[in-house]
Image: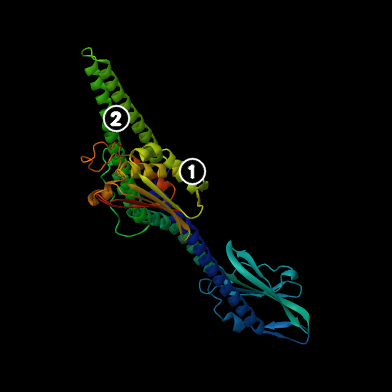
């Protein structure tokens, strides 16, 4: 098998269908003209036959008489003009007379089974068509007449056939070149797509394909590829930013631990100082472990779609279980936790992922609540959705930071609250998991007054 370019394949398929169509048209033209000429010759032969039968008279002895002077004067003296040939036979099939243009040649009289039928024959190796008819008198055959005509008119049929056979391949070749030219014009945007795609690399995702003027399938293809490149560029940039931020966040606790240990080994110290520094390092290691766990969790959901396990989740119990894990901070900060569960609420979702979302939101609400603050948790129905509302009386989030809270490693200015630790990944994880579970999340916050988080669960 030989391989054709896309342009040539378009032209070839076009020519293949066109060739079949033209072949059918040429065949119809040939058949119609051939039939018309054939009918015309038969009509002329029959006309001559009837004319000569009218010239025959019969006597009382059943012998027919030919009006020789009349029929010989009817343009039968020239073989070049309207060559019609006539012969008369008696009832014994013996030749009686013939037209002068036959000269020394004779037509063929066939058996009675060929009477009144058109027969293809030849005269001096020239094709003719003839018909023979009996001459009757009261139903009795008294003789025969044979009328023939040259098939010179059929020459036009053979000429037409030659013309069609010669012009057929010429037309196809011309049409192929024309189709190939226009196919090349039509796929020009594809060449632009190919050339542009070759310029696109991981380090060069800014290049975009020029959209064609006509909004056809190639326009849609170009636009789709540009949209794909936009998503790729966004993903690569997000990956670069994530890698950079993760590297920085991991490097910081490691540097702190390293610095602390280097200070410890410079000279002997008191036991209490050793214990303090070691406990400090343990705290940093714990923070480092938390950071790594959150990074791995976020990467897991960033790089692949989670195969969710959908089940019936008892939301009331899930919230209470999450609160129990933060009993220490609730006790230390003397936070009043108010749960407003009027009914039992069940949702169809992934228990593990939903528990991560609620746990992170409760952790933030408790972490950023002020001493003797309040955290109110409400469950209610709204149409077909379940609404989970968490309201705290904490430090709040500046309005300028609300659109950034879901960015990885982003933390609002905590210079006023340096004791509050965090990695800045919690809400990024929450946002990602909400997208996976088709949960709508809404944040409302006012600085120094608190934050309200609303989850709309299907």
Query: Are circles 1 and 2 on residues that touch, CB within 8 Å?
Result: no
Q: Residue 27: where, in percent of width, then height?
A: 52, 63
Q: Residue 277: where, in percent of width, then height?
A: 27, 21
Residue for badge 1? 351
Q: Foreground: 38 or 424? A: 424
| Residue at position x 66%, y 75% in the image | 97
- Decide: is 63 above or below 10: below
Q: Nearer the viewer, mark 1 or mark 2?
A: 1
Residue for badge 2? 250
Q: Quadrant of residue 270?
A: top left
Q: Foreground: 140 or 33? A: 33
For label 1, the SS is helix
Q: Foreground: 320 or 349? A: 320
Q: Is residue 34 visible?
A: yes
| Residue at position x 25%, y 29% in the image | 252
Left-right relation of 150 to 175? right
Q: Residue 382: where, in percent of width, then height?
A: 45, 60
| Residue at position x 61%, y 67% in the image | 105
Looking at the rendered structure, the number of numbered marks drawn on it comes to 2
Q: How crowded is mark 1: few (under 14 residues within 10 Å), some or many (20 or more)?
A: some
Q: Which residue lies furthest to the bottom in this view?
A: 60
């Amino acid at each position: 098998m030989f391989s054709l370019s896309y342009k040539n394949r378009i032209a070839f398929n076009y020519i293949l269908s066109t060739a079949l169509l033209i072949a059918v048209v040429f065949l119809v033209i040939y058949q119609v003209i051939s039939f018309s000429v054939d009918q015309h010759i038969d009509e002329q032969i029959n006309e001559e036959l009837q004319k000569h039968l009218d010239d025959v008279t019969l006597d009382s002895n059943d012998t027919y008489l030919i009006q020789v002077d009349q029929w010989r004067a009817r343009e039968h003296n020239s073989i070049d003009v309207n060559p019609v040939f006539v012969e008369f036979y008696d009832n014994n099939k013996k030749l009686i007379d013939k037209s002068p243009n036959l000269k020394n040649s004779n037509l063929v009289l066939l058996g009675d089974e060929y009477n009144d039928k058109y027969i293809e024959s030849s005269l001096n190796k020239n094709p003719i068509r003839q018909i023979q008819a009996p001459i009757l008198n009261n139903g009795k055959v008294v003789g025969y007449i044979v009328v023939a005509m040259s098939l010179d008119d059929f020459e036009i049929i053979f000429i037409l056939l030659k013309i069609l056979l010669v012009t057929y391949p010429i037309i196809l070749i011309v049409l192929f070149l024309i189709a190939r030219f226009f196919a090349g014009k039509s796929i020009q945007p594809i060449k632009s797509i190919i050339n542009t795609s070759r310029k696109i690399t991981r380090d060069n995702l800014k290049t975009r394909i020029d959209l064609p003027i006509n909004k056809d399938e190639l326009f849609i293809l170009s636009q789709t590829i540009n949209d794909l490149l936009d998503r790729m560029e966004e993903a690569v940039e997000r990956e670069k930013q994530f890698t950079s931020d993760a590297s920085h966040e991991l490097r910081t606790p490691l540097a702190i631990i390293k610095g602390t240990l280097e200070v410890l080994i410079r000279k002997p110290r008191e036991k209490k100082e050793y214990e303090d520094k070691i406990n400090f390092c343990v705290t940093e290691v714990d923070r480092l472990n938390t950071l790594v766990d959150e990074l791995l969790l976020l990467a897991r959901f960033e790089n692949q779609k989670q195969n969710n396990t959908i089940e019936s989740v008892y939301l009331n119990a899930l919230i209470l279980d999450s609160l129990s894990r933060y009993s220490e901070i609730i006790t230390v900060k003397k936070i009043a936790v108010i749960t407003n569960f009027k009914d039992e609420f069940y949702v169809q979702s992934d228990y593990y992922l939903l528990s991560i979302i609620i746990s992170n939101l409760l952790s933030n609400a408790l972490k950023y609540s002020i001493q003797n603050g309040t955290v109110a948790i409400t469950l209610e129905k709204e149409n077909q959705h379940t609404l989970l509302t968490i309201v705290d009386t904490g430090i709040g989030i500046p309005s300028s930071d609300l659109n950034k809270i879901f960015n990885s490693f982003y933390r609002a200015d905590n210079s006023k609250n340096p004791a509050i630790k965090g990695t800045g990944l919690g809400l990024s994880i929450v946002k990602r998991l909400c997208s996976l579970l088709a949960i709508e999340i809404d944040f409302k916050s006012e600085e120094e007054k608190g934050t309200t988080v609303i989850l709309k669960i299907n």
